[in-house]
Each structure stands twice: as structure tokens, then as C-alpha cells.
Image: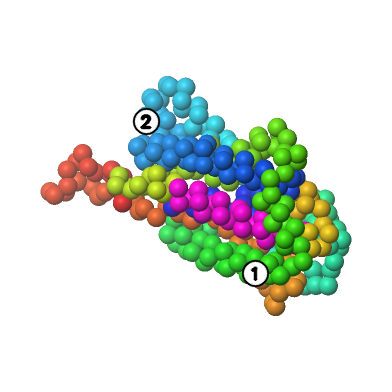
Amino acid sequence: AAAGSAVGLGNIWKFPYVTGTNGGGLFVLVYLACIALIGLPIMIGEILLGRAAQSSPVGAFRKLAGRQSPWVGLGWMGVAAAFIILSYYSVVAGWTMHYAVLAITGRFAGLGPERVGAVFGEVYASAPINLGWHLAFMALTMAVVVGGVQKGIERWARILMPALFLMLLALLLRGVFLPGFGEAMGFVFGLHADRLTASGVLEAMGQAFFSLSLGMGAMLTYGSYMGRDADIVQSSISVSFLDTMVALLAAVVVFPITFSFGMEPAGGPGLVFKNIPIAFAQLPAGGLLGSCSSCCWSSPPSPARSRCWRSPRPTSSTSAAGAGARRCW
């Protein structure tokens, strides 16, 4: 249910560049440990709270702890965290939309790593591009959300999420045959203890929270749609596993390109935007595929699989106590 919320730019854009910045290898191991030992238990707790309260983050704490409880402030903190994350997430998603236009118009055709990197520098430094595509992304997001869960988010997520997986697999198959594939695997999965710092450990834990959408009320909200007979532990394990696999797959796609073309793995936030265009340029119909891939990165989260509705007004067969109650399965 929450896989669509967890899988996204945090996996494909952020995880490769923080892995490169922190030297790969041991950082990845610490990240996996944080997912299993910290992220997964917190996800289970958030979903459990949501299912128990059947309400939004703020409403859940009001219902479970009382309206005057200081715990209500925790719900508001989650809402604030989501708002702050959206303030820059929408800018990065705007970059992907801009890159979709550049790819389909052939801007990257025949460009080497230096010129592709220069294109990102131009995008990064341009206030009109950043603001314009930020507004476009927000407008598109609102247009999808207005359609509701089934006709809006679910309809598009069913198209974009599978497309994203297929494109990542296509890029992975291409990367296997690149000369830098072996070196990339050594970088990502080799234990380089000398490259990891204390700040890198904290960044691995922060990436685990960011990637799993923890601490911002998202999982709590998804939990409010879960039925009483749903297995929360199994669902949380499935979401965490899928999210982690996509993150690792993104790293395995990006770093073979990095090492094959002599690029710097510690490329920062622009790492994916400097690598992926080169990969698509070597595939048939690469411009079209690159455009579609960029759109899929910023796809909206898929909705919970459970369904909820309000029961009808009381009739001869419906008690007044059950009227207006939220029903889920």
C-alpha cells in the first residue's frame, strides 16, 4: 500500500549521490542496517497508530492521547516535516520534468560527460527554470490529487510505477556490458572502512528515514486505510524490501556509467542528472525513453490498497450509532 510513497526520488536521485559522497561500500551496509533495525520497526509503529486511530496524523494523536496532550504536537511536526520536504522535493521533481523535455527534443544527443554536466549546471543555476518547473510540478500534482485516490493517484501510479521498473531493468542490462561495471560493483558493495565517517553514519540513518517516508505522517495516514485483519508486519517488510531493492538497483545503474566515463562518484545532487542522459543516449529511442523515465521518477505515490467509505444515514436496518462511521477492508 505504501510502496508508492516510499519508492521515488529518494531512491533514484538521492541514494546514489549520498552513496557516492560517502564512499559506497560500508555506507551501503550501514544504510541496510538502519532500514532493518530502525526504519522497519518505526514503520510498523506508524502504521499501527494509523490503523488504531483511523485518522490523519494530527487527528490520530488527538484521538489516542487526548486533544490537550503534548503528543498532538508530534502530529503537527510530521505535517511540518512533509511541507519542508515538499519545498525542495518539488524543485528536484521539476528538474526531472525539464530533463524530460530536453531528452525528447534531442538536447543530449551526441553530448559527452562534460557537456551533459554543463547542462545540469545551467539548470541548477537558472532561477526561471527552477521556479517555472516547480510550479508546473505542483500544478500537475494537484491535478492528479484532485482526481482522488482511485481516479487520480491510483490510475497514474499503475502506469508510471511499472514503467519505472522496466526502464531501470533496461538500464541495468546496458550497464552490465559497460567496462566500468566491475569497478562500480566493488565501489557499491566493497567494504571501504576508511571512506566512512561519523557524519556518514548519521546520513545513512537519515536516508533510511527519508527513503521510507518516516516521521512525516505518511505511513500513519496509509495505516488509517488498513483493515483490522491486515498483517502490518508483513506489509511493512514488503514495503521496506521493495524500497531497498529499488535504491540498490538505482546505484547499480548509475555507478557503472560513472566509472565507465571517468566521472566522479562523489558528484553530489547532480550525479543522476549527469549519468542517466548518457545511458539513454546509448539505447534505441533513448530520447523517448529518457523522457518517460524522468516523468516516472516524480510519479505520485500509489494509494493504499484498502478501501474506505462512509456508511449511509440510519435506516430501519442501520443503527444510528453506525451512521457515518468509516469502514475499511
Distance in Å between CA atoms under marks 1 and 2: 50 Å
> Badge 2 is on which residue?
63
- Front of the two marks 1 and 2: 1
Q: Nearer the viewer, residue 115 or 76?
A: 115
Residue 16 seen by the camera: no
Q: Position of residue 90 (x, y in %)?
A: 65, 50
Q: Is residue 84 left or right of residue 326?
A: right
Q: Residue at x 67, y 55 (%)?
A: 251
Q: Main secondary structure of the magenta part?
A: helix
Whether residue 327 appears in magenta in the rendering, the answer is: no
Q: Nearer the viewer, residue 260 or 227?
A: 260
Tell me which label, 1 or 2, sits earlier in the chain.
2
State which region is magenta.
237-258
Q: Is residue 48 left or right of residue 32?
A: left
User: Which residue type does callout 2 highlight?
Assistant: Lys
Q: Residue at x 23, y 47 (%)?
A: 313
User: Which residue type does callout 1 highlight?
Assistant: Leu
> Badge 1 is on which residue?
173
Position of 46 relative to 317 (above/below): above
